Amino acid sequence: MDNVTTHGSVAHGHAHAAHHELGFWRKYVFSVDHKVIGIQYAVTGLLFLLFGFTLMMIMRWQMAYPGRPIPLIGAWLGQDRAPMGVMLPEFYNQLGAMHGTIMVFLGVVPLAVGGFGNFVMPLQIGAPDMAFPKLNMMSYWVYFLGGVTMLASFFPTGGAAQSGWTSYPPLAVIAPGQTMWLVGMIFLITSSLLGSVNFIVTIVQLRAKGLTWMRLPFFVWAQLVTAFLLLLAFPPLEAAGVLQLMDRVGGSSFFMPSGLVVSGKPLMISGNGNPLLWQHLFWFLAHPEVYVLILPAFGIISEIIANNTRKPLWGYKTLVYSVVFLGFMSFIVWAHHMFMTGMGTTMSAFFQTTTMIISIPSVIVLTSLLLSLWGASIRFNPPMLFALAFLPMFAIGGLTGLPLGLAPSDIHLHDTYYVIGHFHYVVAPGTIFALFGGVYYWFPKATGKKMNEMLGYLHFWGSFICINLVFMPMFIQGLGGMNRRMYDGGAQYAHNAGLLKWNLVIGFAAWSLGLFQLPFIYNFFNSIKWGKAVDKNPWEATTLEWSAPSPPGHGNFLTEPVVYRGPYEYSVPGAARDFSPQFEA
Amino acid sequence: MDIPYIVETRPDTGLANGKLGIWLFLASEVMLFGALFSTYIILRVGAPEWPHGELSVLLGAINTVLLISSSVTMVMAWASLKMKDFGKHRLYLILTVLLAAVFLVNKYFEYAEHYAKHELPSHSTFFAIYFTLTGLHGLHILGGIIVMVYFLGPGAKMWKTNADQFTNRIEYTGLYWHFVDLVWIFLFPVLYLL
């Protein structure tokens, strides 16, 4: 793994604080230190994001130039995926399903929760480590196993899962590749469960002296609510995964209705199952999962905004109550993904109402963060640019979701590119931008070096322009009725005639977006060794992690941290400096 | 700095880390079995007919008694530690493991009979949910046995070095074990009687 080499250089500074010298394997590979595990999660997560994005760049070739051989790599994809370099529909479906799965379960969540949560949260609460360090190591390695299973699933005959990341039966039960997907998911879910127990116990039990609930950095609150969502929403998907596995391997019919006919032959199954049941169990997880994706982003953004506006967050308590309410509500909105299934108007009415209610705390969070900018003299460094871009991008993603939360408009839009545009605005220029901001912001803490700012600006502006060119046209295509699952974009439909040309724009924007990640990758690895060395608090921030050495040694803090004030006391009138850290009396 | 509150409780929360951890784990287990019980309800409500009398109520009842007894011996195993009687603790823990093992043997005979009659998960949604629920529950029993055997074997050394933490570990094992029993107490009427 690449991350091993990364840690090799990251952790040189550890030696002075270690009680006893651990061997290479225990120190960097099977480490129980939350910081090493956090970096392992983050680097693995970033690699999976790159891989998932690469799958999408290949799909975008097929959308832009249907039926033309894929350049560069087309020849190596093999006869059963792309004969003569031309993509088969089955392979397109595999790429689509695996892009979703990889981005959500192997990329964003491990980076946002496993990476940032593991590395930053214990430091911010003044803890020496996570509450259960061995469990922490285990959750990383179970996640790793899940990732390997998912990657390996491309190779057997029939290829990877191809029923979408939602894996709706009956298709998912009869299509090839799904079994390995299910096994991989069971690993990933188990890993998340172990992690979430660890996070909650750590936050509840290991807060430093004086760190009361209302003095917690907002990032920690966001991680706490996220951990509860993972803890309570993931088990039903684990149950659903076991049931689908039984359907595939054990021949049961949990999700298989009677009377199914495949390729002209009736299926020899007992029947009487309920395909809608899968959707309920799946979305019972997958809607809270949306908040698992967005809450850590809120947390990261809040830290960066407070730090670079040099002002307290506007409405800290309101933010806290909002995310707690958001977490609670996220458990009772799931069926707004299912308006098209014929589950009935009573159900639709209920879930429309809860969906409208859950938009309120999201708007409160966004408004608070926006108001925090008011009257500030803002420092425009790379993390802040990503944080500032997050606000309008998430707003576009959120507001375009409203028509999808109401059944009448959802019926028109549901199976179109509008939906793709909507949730990618939330997750890509939303969450992933926040995660990039977090990498730039906490990189000095993890390595003692700052990332190059010039390359940071290049990365930001390039990504910002390209990503909007990728997703904005999807709203146009979607409103025009272009279906979101056709492997050639749906060229046979007349209403798509004027819309398909946008696929060229999206394609070139996506490939350029890929190119603009190169400065980031170079910057990331180059700065570990050659970055500008900085002291332990380069951003002049107030929260506890900046009182530890950079990089923090084993046990994190040189003296036991004590907290004297709230998390964002910037520009306190009468204070000598424009920041009053939590850890200074 | 060492990790605090492994043995002693944190004053403002009144909890040791492990206790909070095991309760959170059990909360996720409730959601896991909750989802499976919901599946049972939805399948049964939607089914044109639902079989009755397919399972041996006698074997099920014996297993219920076995598991409830094992819950009692589990509590005794913990209480003996609290009274510093390590010998009694071992006796009760061995009894718990034995009761759990007999439960699984019983379950094996039940499964074997269904297998002989070709009553497998592919037979009907009733047997599908029966095997899934009892199979998953059986895995939980097996997990509990493994943990208890560990505390009878290498894990028992901790009694000498850190008696309080060992007692806590047995308490957490007990909490898990009671939960597994509780699941069975729902499973028995739902599958065998109703």
Image (spheres, coloured by chain):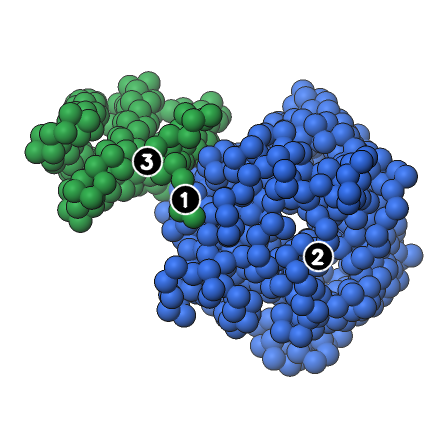
Depicted B23 relative to depicted A89: above or below: above
Q: Quick check: A444 left or right of A383?
A: left
Percent position (x, y) of residue A27? Answer: 42, 64
Numbered circle sitting on residue B3: 1
Residue that badge 3 annotates? B7
Q: Are marks 2 and 3 in contact (CB under 8 Å)?
A: no
Mark closer to the observer (2, 3): 2
**Hey, what amino acid is under mark 3?**
Val
Numbered circle sitting on residue A100: none
* Of residues A581 and B68, the one drawn nearer to the viewer in this rendering: A581
Q: Give the secondary structure at mark 3.
A: loop
Percent position (x, y) of residue A492? Answer: 81, 58
Task: Give chain B's shade.
Answer: green
- Residue drawn 59% across the image and 30% down it: A213
Q: Give the secondary structure at mark 1.
A: loop
Numbered circle sitting on residue A538: 2
Q: Indicate the quadrant where residue A54 lies.
A: bottom right
Disc 1 residue crowd, few under 14, some 14–19, many 20+, Cα 10 Å: some
Chain to which mark 1 belongs? B
Mark closer to the observer (1, 2): 2
Task: Give chain A's shade.
Answer: blue
Q: Quick check: A430 left or right of B48?
A: right
**Hey, what amino acid is under mark 1?**
Ile
Can residue A365 be seen at all in this image of the molecule? yes
Q: Give the secondary structure at mark 2.
A: loop
Q: Indicate the quadrant where residue A227 lies.
A: top right
Q: Indicate the quadrant where residue A351 lies.
A: top right
- Residue drawn 65% across the image and 34% down it: A565
